[in-house]
Amino acid sequence: MATPPLPQPSAPESSRKPARPVADAQPPFPDAAAAKPAREGTVFHLLVERGWDPELAYTADQRIRAMTSEIVAAGLQPVLAELRQMRESMVTKADLAGFATKADLAGFATKADLAGFATKADLAGFATKADLERTENNLRREIAERDVRLIKWMFGAMLAQAALIVALIVGFLTLLA
């Protein structure tokens, strides 16, 4: 966007206003040196000192302030959104009220109470998860092998039974004939 040319000064040197002093601001931290605040209406006073018409200088000052505020506001929105999100995710005392306190945990077992129970060294001779998985796999293999043997015997028995039935029928037919 093209910027329009600045108007030529039209006010005489005698129409300048003296700058208003700004009250001294307190430093944000006690040890910090107070930063020198900018004079209020600095742009206005500079333009008037350069010979601009006071109304035109005031309008220019106000427009610069508005544009600066818009630029700063656009940059602040993400920061403000992040701060809101952080505030919402903070833990409050009300959130912590439901958790157990030291007094609540006083009746539970302590290290001294647990000293008489088994340790890792005591449990070293017991089966591990890997041992159990290996045993399970061996059992599954043995069951599958027995199933195959059982099916073979069943087919053999069925074949013997069929042969016996055929032999009986043939023997019976030979007796009748």
Image (spheres, rainbow, N blue to C red):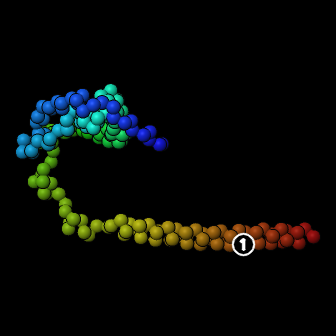
> Residue 41 at what x, y percent from top left?
24, 32
Q: In this orientation, which residue lies closer to the viewer: 113 or 146?
A: 113
Residue 23 shows up from this direction: yes
Q: In this orientation, which residue lies closer to the viewer: 144 or 79?
A: 79
Image position of 153 (left or right of 49): right
Residue 43 shows up from this direction: no
Residue at (83, 68) in percent of width and height? 169
The quadrant of the image that shows the C terminus is: bottom right
Image position of 29 (left or right of 73): left
How many badges with numbers are in the image?
A: 1
Q: In this orientation, which residue lies closer to the viewer: 154 or 164?
A: 154
- Against 109, residue 87 (above or below) is above
Q: Residues within 10 Å of mark 1 (few under 14, many from 20)?
A: few
Q: In this orientation, which residue lies closer to the viewer: 168 or 91?
A: 91
Residue furthest to the left: 31
Q: Quadrant of residue 61?
A: top left
Task: Say which residue label 1 marks.
Answer: 160
Residue at (19, 60) in percent of width and height? 118
Image position of 54 (left or right of 122): right
Q: Quadrant of residue 132?
A: bottom left
Q: Quadrant of residue 33?
A: top left
Residue at (21, 65) in percent of width and height? 120
Name which residue type carries label 1.
Ala
> Residue 153 at what x, y percent from top left?
63, 71
> Residue 7 at what x, y percent from top left?
39, 35
Residue furthest to the right: 177
Instruction: Tell me the element at label 1.
Output: helix
Residue at (37, 68) in percent of width and height? 130
Image position of 119 (left or right of 172): left
